Image (tube, helix red, strand yellow):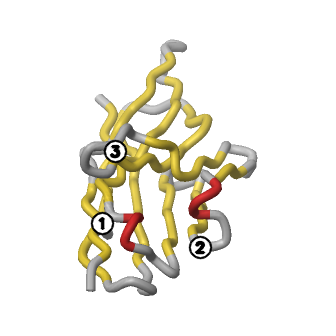
Amino acid sequence: QVQLVESGGGLVQPGGSLRLSCAASGSIFSINAMGWYRQAPGKERELVASITSGGSINYVDSVKGRFFISRDNAKNTVSLQMNSLKLEDTAVYYCDADLWLPGGRNLEAWGQGTLVTVSS
């Protein structure tokens, strides 16, 4: 069984910073891409940032220059440093991992979500 456990959400004022972390555990052979999605009330889930095992990174335009994704391949963790937070960044943030299980099965795993609220 594979688990993705997120931490680091909370309440922050506009302009503030938060760091989200996600750790994957369980019977994992390897992890391809890891990423962060978010879903705001009444909106569809969107990809915020992703990073491959080789370090290739993508960001949604709205967070470029403010959010920074990183991962530790040895520890199966991914983090999202969020700076200059805006009201519109308020959402539930989900960690995602595209991974391979022993035996060759591919799996997309999700965390339970962590709430980020930007409010004055």
Find residue 118 and report its horizontal and vertical position in percent: 31, 74
The mark that comes first in sequence, 2 or 1, is: 2
Find residue 62 and report its horizontal and vertical position in percent: 58, 60
Residue 86, quarter of picture = bottom left
* Residue depicted at 49% across the width and 14% down the height: 105
Tell me the mark number nearer the camera, choosing from 3 and 2: 2
* Residue depicted at 45% across the width and 22% down the height: 107
- State the CA–CA distance, disc 3 to disc 2: 24 Å
Q: Amino acid at mark 3?
A: Leu
Q: Is residue 10 above or below residue 112?
A: below
Q: SS at mark 1?
A: strand
Q: Is residue 65 left or right of residue 88?
A: right
- State the CA–CA distance, disc 2 to disc 1: 15 Å
Q: Which residue is mark 1?
A: 116
Residue 42, quarter of picture = top left
Q: Is residue 89 left or right of residue 71?
A: left
77 and 16: which is toward the camera: 16
Q: Which residue is mark 2?
A: 66
* Residue depicted at 29% across the width and 28% down the height: 1
The mark that comes first in sequence, 3 or 2, is: 3
Q: Which residue is mark 3?
A: 4
Q: Amino acid at mark 1?
A: Val
- State the CA–CA distance, disc 1 to disc 3: 18 Å
Find residue 60 and report its horizontal and vertical position in percent: 61, 52
The mark that comes first in sequence, 1 or 3, is: 3
Q: Amino acid at mark 2?
A: Arg
Q: Residues within 10 Å of mark 3 (few under 14, many from 20)?
A: many
